[in-house]
Image (cartoon, grey):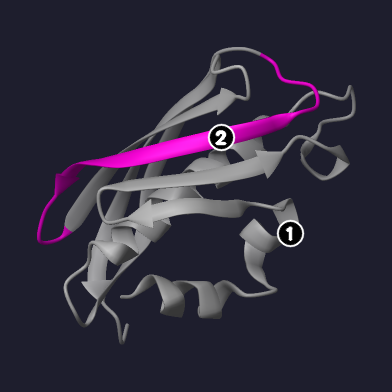
Amino acid sequence: MELAEIMRLNEGRGLGHTLGIELVEATPDRVVMRMEVGERVQQPFGFLHGGASVALAETVASVGGLLGCPPGKAVFGQEINANHLRPKQGGALVATGWPLHRGRTTQVWQIEIAGEDGKLVCVSRCTLAVVDARQ
């Protein structure tokens, strides 16, 4: 799938839109996205909600996975884990992901999420199922 088609499918809708996730760079081998840490992604005490980090990580993996799929194939999140390394209040996050494995039926992506200062906030690994696009 081409990047323009992915962007068109997500334009103005979906969880990424709701969370304010912005695409910075995307190739089949590297995806970079950005997300502001504001009210929509904070827990009640003003810190980044861990679920928002996980959603950001899966969005990175999914875009990269789609870009790396053969024609007629699509990807769906199958498993994701995340280690939250430090709290974050305000500012922005930059998530960078790359494939560790691209197989016929699965892909595995590594995602690092850092603050603008470069300090890691979260690391995640996401397994994607590769399926027929018509499913």
Three-letter amino acid code at the position of disc 1: Thr
- Residue 18 has which mark? 1
Is 4 drawn above or below residue 16 in the view shown?
below
Residue 49 position, x and y percent, is 72, 31
Residue 2 position, x and y percent, is 34, 75
**What residue is drawn where x is 63% and y is 58%?**
16
**What residue is drawn where x is 56% and y is 34%?**
94
Residue 130 position, x and y percent, is 23, 64
* Residue to which mark 2 is pinned: 94
Is any part of residue 112 visible from this angle?
Answer: yes
- Residue 32 has which mark? none
Q: Nearer the viewer, residue 85 or 78?
A: 85
Is any part of residue 77 visible from this angle?
Answer: no
**What residue is drawn where x is 10% and y is 61%?**
104
Earlier sequence position, callout 2 versus callout 1: 1
Three-letter amino acid code at the position of disc 2: Val
Q: Residues within 10 Å of mark 1 (few under 14, many from 20)?
A: few
Q: Which element carries disc 1, helix, strand or loop?
A: helix
Q: Residues within 10 Å of mark 2 (few under 14, many from 20)?
A: many
Side of 36 where 67 appears, left or right? left
Point out the stretch of residues depicted in magenta.
Answer: 87-105
The answer to which image quadrant residue 79 occupies is top left
The quarter of the picture where the N terminus appears is: bottom left
Q: Residue 119 magenta-drawn?
A: no
Side of 117 where 113 appears, left or right? left
The residue most toward the bottom is 134
